[in-house]
Amino acid sequence: PYSMIAAGLGDLLGKSTCLCDWRLANIITGGDKLSDGTLKDVYDTPENTMPAFLSALSLGYASIETDPQITRDGVVVLMHDDTINRTCRHADGSLIEKPIRISETTYEELLSFDAGIAHGEQFRGTHIPRLDELLSAAEGRDVTVALDKKIPTERVDALIDVVLRHRARVSFSTSDTGRIRKIQARMPDAMFDYDVNLSDDALREVTTLVKPENLMIWM
């Protein structure tokens, strides 16, 4: 395991705190490579797809990072980009020329595209997954599903609804205390990954709101 502690922040926060515990790999989406090659089986799969997630689960990684977004009809799916064009293709494998935005497309419409074939013929037929699918697979496993903050705070209830349907361990990415408060109103013991605003005042507020064991601060 790897830990990163910023000098002086222990005094600022009034406690001896490990601010960033990477635990081998915190970013496992199937798209991010590490130079030592330890993620080979994962990054040999199409990013943000069930083949990538299932590979990470089978390898026993402690954390899986993913990118929830909401379709036009309110389904929470997993995709890094706002559009599907970089990672997806038409069912026949051809390029998608017109930008297809997640927020402007229904889930049923998204199912007509292939999320795997661009990465290799062996992944033909892979679909854009719903968050429900990943959380179902993660239930009962010693893994944290880290949910990036692509869904805006005013729509985060849709994300919480999905999380509460499952018994998987998750953490919520955030850079503002308003998002923390809104999530805590429904999930008082939620875990958070906090970044961006690292001013003294912001860190004091965040560490007041969130228990040390439920907080990871990215430096």
Image: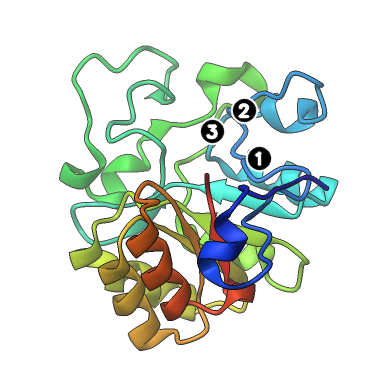
Q: Position of residue 34 (x, y in %)?
A: 71, 24
Q: Position of residue 25 (x, y in %)?
A: 72, 42
Are discs 1 and 3 less than 8 Å apart at CB? no
Q: How far is disc 1 from disc 3 in space, using C-alphas?
A: 11 Å
Quadrant in the picture for residue 123: top right
Q: Which amino acid, by three-letter code, is at mark 2?
A: Phe
Q: Which amino acid, by three-letter code, is at mark 3?
A: Gly
Quadrant in the picture for residue 191: bottom right
- At x 58% / y 19%, what residue is drawn? 119
- Can residue 134 be seen at all in this image of the molecule? no
Which numbered disc covers residue 51?
A: 1
- At x 74% / y 18%, what residue is drawn? 35
Q: How far is disc 3 from disc 2 in space, using C-alphas?
A: 6 Å
Are discs 2 and 1 less than 8 Å apart at CB? yes
Are discs 3 and 2 less than 8 Å apart at CB? yes
The front one of 205 and 196 is 205
Question: Disc 3 designates what residue?
Answer: 125
Question: Disc 2 designates what residue?
Answer: 123
Q: Which of the two discs, 2 and 1, labels the residue nearer the N terminus?
A: 1
The front one of 173 and 4 is 4
Q: Which amino acid, by three-letter code, is at mark 1?
A: Pro
Q: How far is disc 2 from disc 1 in space, using C-alphas?
A: 8 Å
